[in-house]
Image (tube, helix red, strand yellow):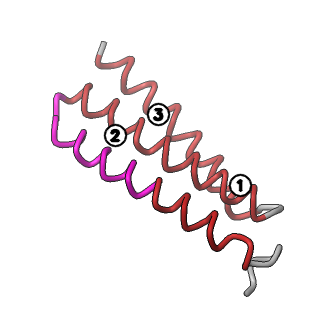
Amino acid sequence: MTSWLLVLAVVLLASLLAGMVRVAVGPTVADRMLAAQLMGTTSVCVLLLTARAWNRPELVDVALVFGLLAAVAAVAFTRYGGEIGEEGER
């Protein structure tokens, strides 16, 4: 069971790499915002899978903090996203 959880975590890490490419390349601000949200959600999932696989309950607390930070980042992107131009300049 532990090996399957770690395999799933590695697959999700590959998804994080794809999200990093989308944040860097764009092409629009909305694409970058959605990719950043994907990265936040995926990092929470990776932390929860590794917490279960390694029997480390403190990683669940870290995942909860990451989840809260991802929600705050979504609000910040939504609030200030209209002020940033298509190339990311103010």
Comes first in the chain, label 1 or label 3: 3
Comes first in the chain, label 3 or label 2: 3
Separation of residues labelled 1 and 3 (CA atoms): 19 Å
Label 1's element? helix
44 over 4 or under it: above or below = below
Q: Position of residue 86 (x, y in %)?
A: 83, 73
Residue pictured at 71% horizontal, 55% vertical: 22
- Circle 3 residues within 10 Å: few <14, some 14–19, many ≥20: few
The label nearer to you, 1 versus 3, is: 1
Label 1 sits on what residue type?
A: Arg
Label 3 sits on what residue type?
A: Val
Label 2's element? helix
Say whether residue 66 is magenta: yes
Tell whether 43 sits left or right of 15. Answer: left
Q: Where is residue 69 in the image (x, y as percent from the top left)?
A: 40, 58
Q: Residue furthest top?
A: 1
Q: Where is residue 34 in the image (x, y as percent from the top left)?
A: 67, 51
The label nearer to you, 3 versus 2, is: 2
The region drawn magenta spans 55-70
54 over 26 or under it: above or below = above
- Circle 2 residues within 10 Å: few <14, some 14–19, many ≥20: many
Please name the residue that numbered disc 1 is placed on: 22
Tell whether 31 sits left or right of 48. Answer: right
Please name the residue that numbered disc 3 is placed on: 10
Q: Which mark is residue 47?
A: 2
Point out the image quarter for the C terminus: bottom right
